[in-house]
Every structure is written in structure tokens, then in C-alpha cells.
């Protein structure tokens, strides 16, 4: 059974940094992608970034480009989201999710069907 466990959220001042972690377990597939998504109160869930397990290809959404970076620890099966220069608009519940299959993430983050419980990020002074 796939398990995705997020951690690393918290309260940070504008301009600050956080690193989120997504611990992935129970996956037996050779081809899948892990993505980060977020949902702010009263808003729809939106994509942040995703990474392919097989070759490390990444995709980053325009709203966070230049400030957020996705990476992976292959040995420990952890996906990170490094966030810098955080803004109040980044306040949201951040989820990691898995998309099974070999579809490239080069053109976006699609097909995510397994989700973690989320970690809260609050950017406020």
C-alpha cells in the first residue's frame, strides 16, 4: 500500500525559507512520479512541482518558479521541496502525491491519484 507522509511545514516570516519532505513507501512500481500540490483556504488545489522517479526529470509551475526547487533522495525515497523567498500567498496546505506510470513530467504534472495528508505552511509576519 502506497504511503506518502509529508513533513516540514510551519510558520515562517515573509522572505523566509522552508524545506518540505515527502517520505514515500509501499511503491513497487519502476515508473512513477511524485508531485507537490497546495491548497489555500477558499481556493482550488494547484500544482507546485513534480519529479519523475526513473530519470529525475522535473517540472515547476510558473507561480513558484525561481523560488521553489524539487529534489529527491533516491536512497531513502524522500522527495524534497525547498522553498525560499516565501510570500504570504504561499500559505496553504501542501500535499505530496504519486502518479503511476511512465508519462513524462516534462510538460506538466498529471495523473496523480495517491495523496498524503498534507503539511501546513503559513507565511506571516
Image (tube, rainbow, N blue to C red):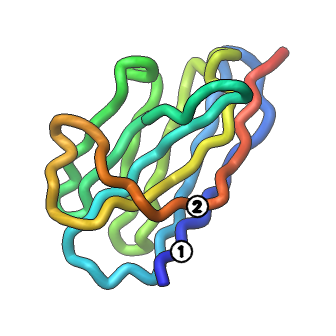
Q: Position of residue 10 (x, y in %)?
A: 77, 40
Residue 45 lies in what quarter of the image? top right
**Do labels 1 and 2 touch, CB within 8 Å?**
yes
Describe residue 43's horizontal placement relative to residue 109 as left or right. Answer: right
Q: Position of residue 49 (x, y in %)?
A: 38, 38
Q: What residue do we see at 20% from left, 69% from top?
A: 31
Vertical relation: 27 (above or below) 46: below
Q: Position of residue 43 (x, y in %)?
A: 63, 25
Q: Which residue is mark 1?
A: 3
Q: What residue do we see at 15% from left, 62% from top?
A: 102
Vertical relation: 58 (above or below) 55: above
Secondary element at image label 2: loop
Instruction: Say whether disc 1 or disc 2 marks the residue closer to the N-terminus.
Output: 1
Which residue occupies the foreground of this view, 55 or 110? 110
Q: Position of residue 91 (x, y in %)?
A: 69, 26
Total marks in image: 2
Which residue occupies the foreground of this view, 125 or 115? 115
Q: Which residue is mark 2?
A: 116
Q: Quadrant of the C terminus?
A: top right
Which residue occupies the foreground of this view, 96 or 74? 96
Describe residue 44's horizontal placement relative to residue 8 as left or right. Answer: left
Work out how far the residue at label 1 is from the one at label 2, CA to CA, in angstroms: 7 Å
Badge 2: residue crowd in 10 Å (few <14, some 14–19, many ≥20): some
Vertical relation: 34 (above or below) 87: below
Q: Which of the labelled discs sits on residue 57, or is there none?
A: none
Secondary element at image label 1: strand
Badge 1: residue crowd in 10 Å (few <14, some 14–19, many ≥20): some
Describe residue 103's horizontal placement relative to residue 91 as left or right. Answer: left
Q: What residue do we see at 66% from left, 59% from top?
A: 117
Vertical relation: 82 (above or below) 5: above
Q: What residue do we see at 46% from left, 64% from top?
A: 114
Amino acid at each position: 500500500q502506497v504511503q506518502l507522509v509529508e513533513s516540514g511545514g510551519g510558520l515562517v516570516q515573509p522572505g523566509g525559507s522552508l524545506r518540505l519532505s515527502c517520505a514515500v513507501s509501499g511503491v513497487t512500481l519502476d515508473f512513477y512520479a511524485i508531485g507537490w500540490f497546495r491548497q489555500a483556504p477558499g481556493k482550488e488545489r494547484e500544482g507546485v512541482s513534480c519529479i519523475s522517479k526513473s530519470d529525475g526529470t522535473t517540472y515547476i509551475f510558473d507561480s513558484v518558479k525561481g523560488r521553489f526547487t524539487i529534489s529527491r533522495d533516491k536512497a531513502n525515497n524522500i522527495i524534497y521541496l525547498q522553498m525560499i523567498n516565501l510570500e504570504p500567498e504561499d500559505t496553504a496546505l501542501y500535499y505530496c502525491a504519486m502518479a503511476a506510470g511512465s508519462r513524462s513530467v516534462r510538460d506538466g504534472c498529471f495523473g496523480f491519484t495517491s495523496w498524503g495528508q498534507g503539511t501546513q505552511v503559513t507565511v506571516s509576519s
